[in-house]
Image (tube, grey):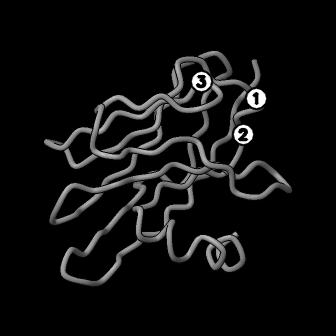
Amino acid sequence: MLLVSILLLGLPFTLRGSRAQSVTQPDLHVTVTEGVHLELRCNYSYAATPYLFWYVQYPDQHLEHLLTYLARDTLVKGIKGFEAEFKESESSFNLRKSSAHLSDSAKYFCAPVALCLGLQGELSTNLL
């Protein structure tokens, strides 16, 4: 039985301003058996409609964009079989994959749009 190890960058991000955004990932480390359903949680707090991103960083690689929520469809399809569902009532944007693979072992990162637009280069240098 192979295990898939998922590390979440569980740092809370808060952006100040008239529409402050906050994103948290409650799970710091998730381990699942290969072939089973995978879900990574992301909770947000935002005064208006949030725009949210999921990124992945595979070992010895740069951040890679998985998917983006832009206030349209609540179910967002991403690359590599990932999807995320925006649930306003739960303030969540959880990343899912129906069948985890060993190649999914990586660090996963949920972020609000302002962080992605203004600080992406700084994040890849300072946090990873």
* Contact between labelled residues 2 and 1, with CB atoms less than 8 Å apart: yes
Q: Residue at x 35, y 43 (%)?
A: 93
Sequence-earlier tag: 3 or 1? 3
* Contact between labelled residues 3 and 2, with CB atoms less than 8 Å apart: no
- Residue 110, given in percent of the width and then of the height, sits at 47, 54
Q: Secondary structure at mark 3?
A: loop
- Seen from this angle, which residue lies furthest bottom? 17
- Residue 71, given in percent of the width and then of the height, sits at 27, 44
Q: Quadrant of residue 22?
A: bottom left
Count residues near mark 2 (Cα–Cα under 10 Å), then give few for <14, some for 14-19, many for 20+.
many
Q: Is residue 108 left or right of residue 2?
A: left
Q: Secondary structure at mark 1?
A: helix
Q: What kind of residue is marked 3?
A: Gly
Q: Residue 81 — which label?
A: 3
Q: Which residue is mark 1?
A: 102
Q: What kind of residue is marked 1?
A: Leu
Q: Nearer the viewer, residue 86 or 41?
A: 86
Q: Secondary structure at mark 2?
A: loop
Cα distance between the residues tagged 1 and 2:
6 Å
Count residues near mark 1 (Cα–Cα under 10 Å), then give few for <14, some for 14-19, many for 20+.
some
Q: Which residue is mark 2?
A: 105
Q: What kind of residue is marked 2?
A: Ser
Cα distance between the residues tagged 3 and 1:
14 Å
